[in-house]
Each structure stands twice: as structure tokens, then as C-alpha cells.
Image: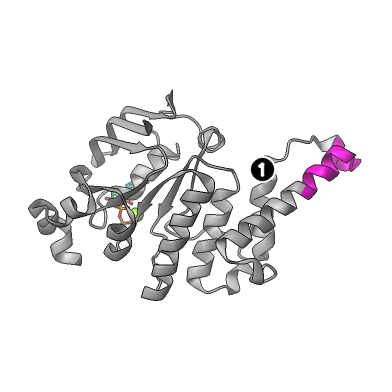
């Protein structure tokens, strides 16, 4: 059963075709990789799925519903969240505050209830604080909850972004180069974390990354993009031995 389906999706930026007629499916509770050379259109695919960019042609379906060109907040509420290639955190807030502000999106008390600090608001705040701490535990940052986000090493900032993305209880989590800037040890730990997240949250994960050990080690299926077109799709073994992929990407990077 597919969680996400892209049908003949194309994105033009003026005269440039960033994504060209892409067909792609993500299965429920799967880990899928999206790889390809710089400028191939990978991040653009994330931006199309999350509604940040409007699709020029084609259709995107999520959980059986058409989400093509819906507003980003609606798509996030429906269950697709993401991290960014360029980390986006509240840099001057603490680790805990970063996650709590994301969790607060789940609150459903109104302004009056908040101003009067009525019991419903009080109870929900307690639950949101518990959720934030729980996420920090899972992500391995509970010991640093009072650190200022900007002072965390790069790899841990990426983990914090994942905790924020998980706060909305997504069914599909999109990770844009989560291992960028990580050393091999940190990358191995990230692989374990990604497995853990899938198991604990029963969600699907789509990962863009240039670290082939991570992508090949963790993904059940991989799509390769080149100049906006789908070049290949298959298991890590199929992708690694595909001559077109080796020529266009792996031969250069790997
Ligand atoms: N908002 C935009 N306006 C114009 N062109 C864009 C825009 N966003 C992306 N592009 C172009 O679309 C193409 C694909 O870019 P994209 O960022 O999706 O590549 P990528 O595969 O994520 O590359 P990288 O591995 O470097 O992150 C590039 O030529 C890029 O310059
Ligand atoms: Mg990118």
C-alpha cells in the first residue's frame, strides 16, 4: 500500500525544468532514498511534496488524498513534515524551547483559555512539555536540553531539526541531507536513529543524502534523479550496479 504517489510531476522555473515528468511511490512504513548529482532536482521534489513550490504539471497523492498544490500548513497537518538542507532552528533558543515551540502547534486551546490559564490549557501545556521531553530523549538530546541551539555541534543541530519535525506526529518524514557535515561515527549513529524513529513512530522516511554508506545501508528503495528526470529506481544493490547510475553519479561521487 502506497503512502505517497507522484504521477507525471513536472516543475518549471521559467525556462528551467527542475523536475521532469517524475513518477514515484513511497510505501507505508518504508525508508526510501532520493539521490543524484547537485542540481538534479532532489530538494525541489521535497518542496513540491510539502507545497512550498507549486507543481507545474502532474499530481501528488498522500494517504489516498490529492495534495497537489495544497498550502504547506495543510500538508504538514495531514502528516508530512521535513528537515531542511540549510538547518532552520531558532538559533538563540534552547534545545528544549526549540522542540516545545514545535509541539505547541498541537495545542487546541483558544486565546481566552490561555489568558485565563484555564484547566484545559494547563493540562495541555503539561502534555506538550512531556511530549517535548520525550522527543528529546528519543533523539538523544535530553542531556543538552538547556543548551542554546546555535552552540550545538552541527550534527546535533540536525538531530534537533528531526525532533522538531517529529513533533507534529507525521506519517511521512522528509530528511534533506541529514548527514551533511557529519563524520563517519555520527553518520552511523544517525542511521540507528533513523531506524529507531521508523519503528517508534510507524512512519515512512524519505532521505536525500550524498553519503552513499548511509543511503545504501538504510534504504529499502532508492530513486536516482539526473537533470530533473528519474534515471533509475530500485534496491540499493540494483542501484549500485546500474551502469547509467554509475556513469551519471556514483562513478563521480563514490
Ligand atoms: N526557487 C527556484 N527558482 C529557480 N530555480 C530553482 C529554484 N529552486 C531550485 N531551482 C533550480 O532547480 C534545479 C534543481 O535544484 P535542487 O535544489 O532541487 O537540486 P538538488 O538536487 O537538491 O541539488 P543539491 O544536491 O545541490 O542540493 C537547480 O538548477 C536549481 O538552480
Ligand atoms: Mg538539495
Question: Which segment is the magenta one?
Answer: 113-126
Please indicate whether residue 184 sits to the left or right of residue 149 in the image: left
x and y percent of residue 98 in the render? 64, 58
- Camera-nearest residue between 225 and 52: 225
Residue reaching furthest to the top: 65
Please indicate whether residue 242 sits to the left or right of residue 77 in the image: left
Asked whether 120 falls inside the magenta stretch, the response is yes
* Residue at 20% over, 42% down: 230
- Camera-nearest residue between 21 and 31: 31
On screen, residue 213 above or below 37: below
On screen, residue 160 above or below 185: above
Mark 1 closeness class: few <14, some 14–19, many ≥20 residues within 10 Å: few
The local secondary structure at tag 1 comes to helix
What quarter of the picture does the N terminus occupy? Answer: top left
* Residue at 44% over, 57% down: 194
x and y percent of residue 105 in the render? 66, 43
x and y percent of residue 169 in the render? 57, 43
Note whether residue 183 is visible. no
* Residue at 38% over, 38% down: 48
- Camera-nearest residue between 225 and 191: 191
Q: How is the image coloured?
A: one colour
Q: Is mark 1 within 8 Å of ligand 2?
A: no
Main SS, magenta region, reads helix
Quadrant of ligand 2 in image? bottom left
Badge 1 is on which residue?
105
Asked whether 101 falls inside the magenta stretch, the response is no
- Image quadrant in which you'd find residue 137: bottom right
x and y percent of residue 146 in the render? 70, 69
Amino acid at each position: 500500500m502506497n503512502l505517497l504517489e507522484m504521477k507525471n510531476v513536472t516543475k518549471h522555473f521559467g525556462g528551467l525544468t527542475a523536475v521532469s515528468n517524475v513518477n514515484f511511490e513511497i510505501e507505508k512504513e518504508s525508508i526510501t532514498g532520493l539521490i543524484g548529482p547537485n542540481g538534479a532536482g532532489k530538494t525541489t521534489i521535497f518542496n513540491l511534496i510539502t507545497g512550498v513550490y507549486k507543481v507545474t504539471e502532474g499530481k501528488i497523492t498522500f494517504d489516498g488524498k490529492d495534495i497537489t498544490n495544497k498550502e504547506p500548513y495543510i500538508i504538514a497537518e495531514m502528516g508530512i513534515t521535513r528537515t531542511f538542507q540549510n538547518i532552520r532552528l531558532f538559533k538563540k533558543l534552547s534545545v528544549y524551547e526549540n522542540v516545545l515551540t514545535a509541539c505547541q502547534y498541537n495545542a487546541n486551546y483558544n486565546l481566552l483559555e490561555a489568558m485565563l490559564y484555564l484547566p484545559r490549557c494547563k493540562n495541555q501545556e503539561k502534555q506538550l512539555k512531556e511530549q517535548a521531553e520525550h522527543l528529546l530523549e528519543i533523539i538523544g538530546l535530553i542531556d543538552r536540553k538547556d543548551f542554546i541551539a546555535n552552540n550545538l555541534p552541527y550534527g546535533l543541530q540536525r538531530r534537533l531539526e528531526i525532533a522538531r519535525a517529529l513533533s507534529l506526529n507525521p506519517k511521512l518524514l522528509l530528511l534533506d541531507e541529514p548527514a551533511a557535515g557529519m563524520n563517519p561515527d555520527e553518520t552511523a549513529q544517525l542511521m540507528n536513529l533513523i531506524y529507531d524513529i521508523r519503528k517508534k513512530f510507524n512512519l515512512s522516511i524519505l532521505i536525500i543524502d550524498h553519503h552513499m554508506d548511509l543511503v545504501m545501508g538504510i534504504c529499502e528503495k532508492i530513486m536516482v534523479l539526473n537533470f530533473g528526470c528519474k534515471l533509475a529506481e530500485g534496491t540499493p544493490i540494483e542501484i549500485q550496479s546500474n551502469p547509467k547510475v554509475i556513469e551519471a553519479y556514483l562513478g563521480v561521487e563514490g
